[in-house]
Image (cartoon, coloured by chain):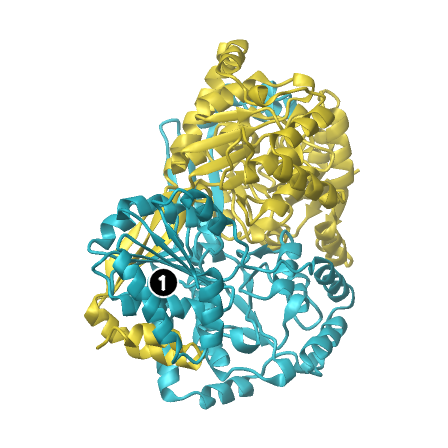
Chain colours: A yellow, B cyan
């Protein structure tokens, strides 16, 4: 059974703090393994890459067969149903429309002293996208990572995806094609991250690597950070539903289970001011579990990490939500906008009873790559700016330089950096 | 002597690649030390923090004396000259004006299906700012980190700065006061990073840590990444001057030396299409070195890592600049804007002969915390968005949900996530 807390109980603060501190992920110590794989790929390139692919994916490749061919992509497209392709295209076009609104603006202006300043955004030249193999190989994640990159203007978008024993998901290749991915390699694990970061004879290096992966992939991404950019390190997914008596308990139960079915380490939490609703949701979860294909996973997640928290007022829930900083927050109350406006920490907020998280997972248009494990306190979901960088610009004429010289030289002297000061004064005569 | 390359030479590509690959930083293996310091501070809090401060900074403190007092800050302000305070205030107000332009915009709109979507930016609640001690304790860096945080709306901005044997720079405290920093602690090293990330009885934890530090600080920041956000890991600073025959060789020499005086690992590079200018700059550097207080550092940096690269045309320099991806790029040519518009990778660009980098270091208004070590290929300088996070927002009504349901369910089924599909269909009846 999930834990049940009541904010009015004496021991609540301690129990809530324990909920916050609970680790849902086994921290495997894979860092040394990842480091040695990276060193091998860096030293021996394709040769090491092929060896690891043989060992870990049971797949024998050559440099010539590392890359997925045009014919294979066409075959994958043909293997999808028209309904699947249409759904992928609906998702792609909606994700594109949402992310086009995120393109950041350049700036350039002249101030009263005559100093011109601003900045200019440009796309990262080449980006690698890691796509997990097996059951976590989601076409929707391909779209969510690739579409913003292409909106940003990334010219070379390279996908890597392991194909254990040669098996792959045709929808993943179809999504890659629809999203405009430029190169696809059938590799995975730390070796794929190493190849993207350092390059091999067959695979040219990229400047940034995004996308989720297992513990080895995460460790490898941490290791190559600096040589290339990386996105966040994703943890198990989570949803927090904030609901009042107006909410439909069956709908909430369905949403909690949609999260729970991802992984036994997923977390689903309900916070409500209505004790009756809490009970109804708990019963509905038990009922719906009975007919769910992934019932075993969902039941384990709900039992181990699920939580139902009763609060006296919705007002009292706000600080709890901010402390949990959920990846996904559904607000199913009489006035969801009002509550949403008062919450600081959440990766994404879904407003009202007709906005299940699953809509945002696929076709809402907003990104489903969101900060997990309380990192919404300090980070954002994936977006167009993650695939661009800002170059700052500054221009003085002789008059502007003269106006600023005194203050600059004063600070340079105070910092003991006389050559800094001289680079200003030498221009004044 | 710095290396001198000519793009027309047969061995150029190899020599340029070697320049790109040269490591300027000794990679000290300090990770295990940082890990054990973090573990101790996490387990024993203030007690461990005070022990490390005693050991590394030779300073005996108690929980009550960890924090810098109001009286000490007032005394530091009084120890600054009026000219220094005025220069700090000029810098602060110009940095503020520039960064106010960076506040990101919220978005909210309704599409043809009736789906409402957008996002909202909010400030990170609490941020820690690491300020190095000793000779690298720069008041300008306090302003460059703190002012954007305050512009972003960070409510609790906490500075940590070691004070070896109790010594500190009054301008650092004055800059902290002017920038509106809320709390200052006299601690440093991995132990300060650990205290900020995990909190102690005296120091409440923050959600993000920014600011430069030594190898131990960098290792500690990498370790706590995930528990808190971090900014980039800064390497030695670098400047690239791109100049033609119109440029003044003495001014260029002063700029190369302003970079070289930072650190023996700093790098100064000149790229020009004018062989005569190259020679004049080299001679001017030698001449100016003779009267420079930090001549020893600057001479070592110039000899070990300096480079002069001759190109046939400025056009031919563009791909070289993009591969070097310099932290600072000065363009001193007849038409600097035209060249700047063609360059993709640079942290900051300084346009024309009257814009020495030192103006941007102090009072131009743009940020001097910029991507080093070729990371301008994938990252940006520090800015207001680094102190904020974006929450995505989505709202469907019954009609919008109905319009999107088919595609969402199709994709959920294709991914084997039936509970996702059910969370949509359950709302349709």
Helix, strand or loop status at disc 1:
loop
Q: Is residue B21 above or below residue B115?
A: below
Residue B198: percent from the left, percent from the top?
68, 62
Tell me where residue B328 sits by quadrant: bottom left
Q: Nearer the viewer, residue B426 or A193?
A: A193
Q: Which chain letter goes with mark 1?
A: B
Tell me where residue A387 sits by quadrant: top left
Q: Is residue A353 above or below residue A337?
A: above
Tell me where residue A139 sits by quadrant: top right
Q: Is residue B209 above or below residue A183?
A: below
Residue extending farthest front: B10
Quarter of the image with the N terminus of chain A in it: top right
Q: Nearer the viewer, residue A346 or A388?
A: A388
Q: Residues within 10 Å of mark 1 (few under 14, many from 20)?
A: many
Whether residue A65 is visible, yes or no, is yes
Residue B272: percent from the left, percent from the top?
30, 54
Quarter of the image with the C terminus of chain A in it: bottom left
A344 relative to A112 in the view: left or right: right
B313 relative to A32 in the view: left or right: left
Residue A18: percent from the left, percent from the top?
75, 53
């Amino acid at each position: 059974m999930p834990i049940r807390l009541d904010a009015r109980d004496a021991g609540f603060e301690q129990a809530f703090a324990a909920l916050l501190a609970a680790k849902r992920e086994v921290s495997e110590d894979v860092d040394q393994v990842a480091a040695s794989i990276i060193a091998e790929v860096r030293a021996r390139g394709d040769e090491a890459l092929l060896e690891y692919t043989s060992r870990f994916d049971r797949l024998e490749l050559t440099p010539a067969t590392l890359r997925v061919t045009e014919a294979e992509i066409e075959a994958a497209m043909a293997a999808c149903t028209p309904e699947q392709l249409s759904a992928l295209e609906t998702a792609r076009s909606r994700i594109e429309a949402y992310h086009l609104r995120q393109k950041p603006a350049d700036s350039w202006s002249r101030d009263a002293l005559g100093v011109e300043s601003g900045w200019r955004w440009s796309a990262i030249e080449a980006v690698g996208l890691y796509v997990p193999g097996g059951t976590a190989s989601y076409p929707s994640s391909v779209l969510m990572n690739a579409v913003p990159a292409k909106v940003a203007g990334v010219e070379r978008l390279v996908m890597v995806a392991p194909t254990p024993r040669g098996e792959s998901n045709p929808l993943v290749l179809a999504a890659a094609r629809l999203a405009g991915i430029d190169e696809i390699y059938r590799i995975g694990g730390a070796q794929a991250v190493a190849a993207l970061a350092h390059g091999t004879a067959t695979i040219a290096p990229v400047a940034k690597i995004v996308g989720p992966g297992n513990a080895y992939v995460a460790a490898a991404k941490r290791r190559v950070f600096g040589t290339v950019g990386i996105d966040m390190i994703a943890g198990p997914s989570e949803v927090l539903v904030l609901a009042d008596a107006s909410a439909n308990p069956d709908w909430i139960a369905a949403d909690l289970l949609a999260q729970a079915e991802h992984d036994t380490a997923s977390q689903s939490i309900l916070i409500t001011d209505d004790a009756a609703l809490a009970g109804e949701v708990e019963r509905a979860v038990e009922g719906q579990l009975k007919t769910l294909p992934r019932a075993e996973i969902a039941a384990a997640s709900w039992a181990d990490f699920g939580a139902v928290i009763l609060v006296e007022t919705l007002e009292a829930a706000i600080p709890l939500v901010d402390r949990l900083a959920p990846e996904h927050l559904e607000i199913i109350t009489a006035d969801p906008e009002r509550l949403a406006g008062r919450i600081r920490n959440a990766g994404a907020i879904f407003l009202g009873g007709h906005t299940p998280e699953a809509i945002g997972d696929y076709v809402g248009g907003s990104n489903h790559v969101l900060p997990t494990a309380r990192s919404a306190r300090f980070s954002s979901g994936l977006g167009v700016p993650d695939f661009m960088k800002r170059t700052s610009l500054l221009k003085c004429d002789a008059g502007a330089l003269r106006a600023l010289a005194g203050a600059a030289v004063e600070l340079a002297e105070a910092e003991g950096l006389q050559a800094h000061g001289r680079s200003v004064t030498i221009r004044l005569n």
